Image: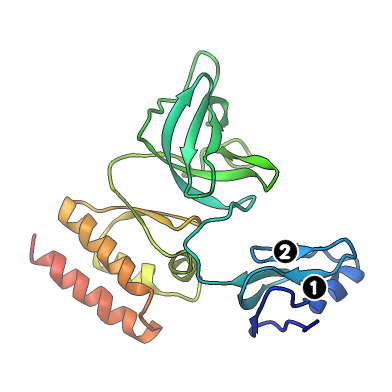
Amino acid sequence: MMIANVGSPVLPGFRVEEAVEIAKTNKKVVLGPGLRQDKDDMVIVCKSGVLRKKHPNTFWVDCYQKRYVPNRGEIVIGIVVQKAGDIFRVDIGASESASLSYMAFEGATKKNRPDVNVGDVICARLLIANRDLEPELICVDSHGKKAKLGVLHEGLVFNCGINLVRKILNPKCAFLDLLAKEMSFEMAAGMNGRIWIKGKTVKQTIALGNAILAVEFKSNDELKDLCDDIGSYVAGFS
């Protein structure tokens, strides 16, 4: 069985011995998408891609995919597709819809229910993500606060590759900072390959969406020119 090294391409079946050695020192190791632990406590790669590591001890496989596999704790953008009693059914782009209780909102009570309707766009966090259980969402943080989660009003929602979401959310990517210098906007990015964007006008919102989609195939050196171009383009409508 091949040994996987951080930063190198990997295939299903490769072993991540670095993660196992860290775990032997009683340090906490977090396994992200593309990795699993077998019955012998060996960490095995289950997706093709590039093995990544984040300080201190988080490992995952960076792979190009459009089909979303839910992972606990991730932020996702969903669309409410059904309301059944006290539960909302939310499409998050996975193999099955996720459930969202009306009590999973800040300040929600039996008398003070959140204003959520079919068709609404929701920014939520995955509370339960298990292959044997239905995904479950919440719209509060660990302190019970909204923390920018909940219903997203107006704006534009579009699908993209999960790799693009990871790229623009990477602290080393200066795209969002550069774009914010050109115009003001609101954005929510879900790890399920969906992005919600809202500019001051409809034309700005569409331009922002096109700019974000173009980032996937741009190098860091090309991002400033892209933001300058989109700023000049939008200025032509003002």
* 230 left or right of 195 in image: left
Residue 113 location (% of width, % of height): 48, 20
Q: Of the residues under marks 2 and 1, which one precedes in the sequence?
A: 1
At 85% from the left and 72% from the top, the residue drawn is 20
Towards the viewer: 9 or 74: 9
Crowd rating for badge 2 (residues with CA inside 10 Å; few <14, some 14–19, many 20+):
some
**Tag 2: amino acid:** Leu
The quarter of the displayed image where residue 42 is located = bottom right
Q: Which label number is shown at residue 19?
A: 1
Q: Is residue 157 above or below residue 35?
A: above
* 83 left or right of 31 in image: left
Q: Quadrant of the C terminus?
A: bottom left
Mark 2: which secondary structure?
A: strand
Circles 2 and 1, Cβ within 8 Å, touching? The answer is yes
Q: Is residue 86 above or below residue 184?
A: above
Crowd rating for badge 1 (residues with CA inside 10 Å; few <14, some 14–19, many 20+):
many
The quarter of the displayed image where residue 176 is located = bottom left
* 4 left or right of 109 in image: right
Residue 193 location (% of width, % of height): 45, 58
Towards the viewer: 141 or 71: 71
**Tag 1: amino acid:** Ala
Q: Which residue is mark 2?
A: 31
Q: Which label number is shown at residue 2?
A: none
Mark 1: which secondary structure?
A: helix
The quarter of the displayed image where residue 37 is located = bottom right
